Amino acid sequence: MNLELFKLKELPFRLNPDPQFLYLSKAHARAKAYMESTIWFTDGFVVITGEIGSGKTTLIETFVSELDSNVTLAQISQTQVTAVEFLQSVLVQFGIKPFQMKKAELLATLNNFLVEQYEAGRKVLLIVDEAQNLGLRVLEEIRMLSGIDNSKEKILRIILAGQPELNAKLDAPELVQLVQRVRLRFHLTALNHDDTRAYILHRLEVAGSQGREIFLPETYDPIYRYTGGVPRLINTLCDTAMLAAANDDRDQVSAGDVKAAVGELQWVEFGQRPSTGRVAATARATAQAIRQIERVPQPVAGAPLARLLVMSHGKTVCERALSVGRIIIGRASDADLHVDSPVISRHHCQIVTSEKLCVLEDLNSSNGVYIKNQRVRRHNLNDGDVVSLGAHQILYVDERPGTRLGADAEAPDTGSHPRLAPAGGASG
């Protein structure tokens, strides 16, 4: 492609995962926040699923690029392996040569390594991409690894990412013990129409468009119809459409260029693709669910609107469902949510819950309330926010149906999905 014609500094729609091009839709932001939560909460692991091309790998690469230097990482993507080969792959990622070891030696070496890292004050994270290919025996090994502790807390943090088949595999009767250790489970859906347009504009801006209109407004409808909002398909179609425009020496892409690109790629509309029936069905189901939510904006009567997971030293201390009303958080015995810590005030803060949002307010506490490593007085809570109160962290999970699908309940006043960090600590 002629970058000079479009006045761009780099190709905007390459297929390789590149963190600087990541577009954080509401769903992607939530998935990223759940990944980040593994750094601070060690009791259980996180499962992220999504269709092919939904952006999982780019999300993982972005998350990895932001990890602190005190995190020791093993990242596995070759998953069609035996249990022994998997353990060997993990040790290789940690800089150990394990190929002459038997399984018992592999497990002992890995256990010793994890304990050494813990004693050195380091956090150890295992990320397994393409986890839908893992056999039941390998998944059982992962469950066993997740149980390694120092008598106080689990040592190994784990993220499993994969295609939707991973969910079906985890629901197998043989893996009931593993599923019990899953703390958060999230499915990454395709982009909606508005996010598809924002995604295209974001990638063009990163590539150097400086706000210039490269794709005419008429192009976004056909792009969405033929891609279904799947990021990888958007990249392919947009790149081919830009080539079509460049062949005519034009620096703007028209609907005709999109049509020409569709013809060259020999695509049909996304919902009619026989080879992506499962993806199309997911997209249609998601669209139908969104339409239902738009028709019935209020949550089901009696259902919790949100919940709080209170963590201390990586372990869940308690969980609290939120309904309409107010709860007081503090160390006093009459507090609605009792947190036993000398650094927390008797009535430290409150959360006021309405049908549309939850608002956190500091009640003039001595040591403050922190989100994203910054002290806040009042904050509209967003799904995935972590509130730090001394050595305790409170994970906020929004249970409103629209929010769980990525709908924005209320604009935040200090950022959408913050980096997860305790008060006064470094970002994770």
Image (cartoon, rainbow, N blue to C red):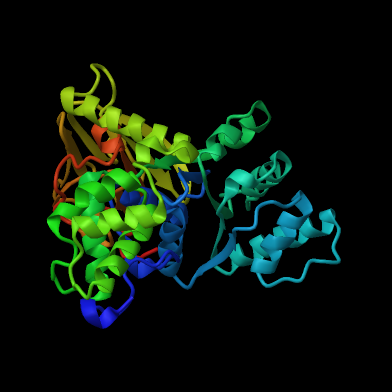
- In this rendered view, identify the residue nearer to me: 58 or 68: 58
Res. 47 in view:
yes
Q: Position of residue 212 (x, y in %)?
A: 13, 71
Q: Position of residue 49 (x, y in %)?
A: 47, 44
Can you say which quadrant of the picture contains the N terminus? bottom left
Q: Residue furthest bottom?
A: 4
Please state if 108 lies on the left or on the right of 265 as rendered.
right
- In this rendered view, identify the residue nearer to me: 361 or 160: 160
Res. 415 in view:
no
Residue visible at 81% across and 66% down? Answer: 99
Please state if 20 lies on the left or on the right of 17 as rendered.
left
Residue visible at 22% across and 28% down? Answer: 291
Residue visible at 33% across and 59% down? Answer: 419
Q: How many marks?
A: 0
Residue visible at 41% across and 50% down? Answer: 266
Please state if 249 lies on the left or on the right of 234 as rendered.
left
> In this rendering, is residue 15 above or below 347?
below
- In this rendered view, identify the residue nearer to me: 376 or 87: 87
Can you say which quadrant of the picture contains the C terminus? bottom left
- In this rendered view, identify the residue nearer to me: 401 or 308: 401
Q: Position of residue 191 (x, y in %)?
A: 30, 46
Q: Residue furthest top?
A: 301
Q: Position of residue 292 (x, y in %)?
A: 23, 24
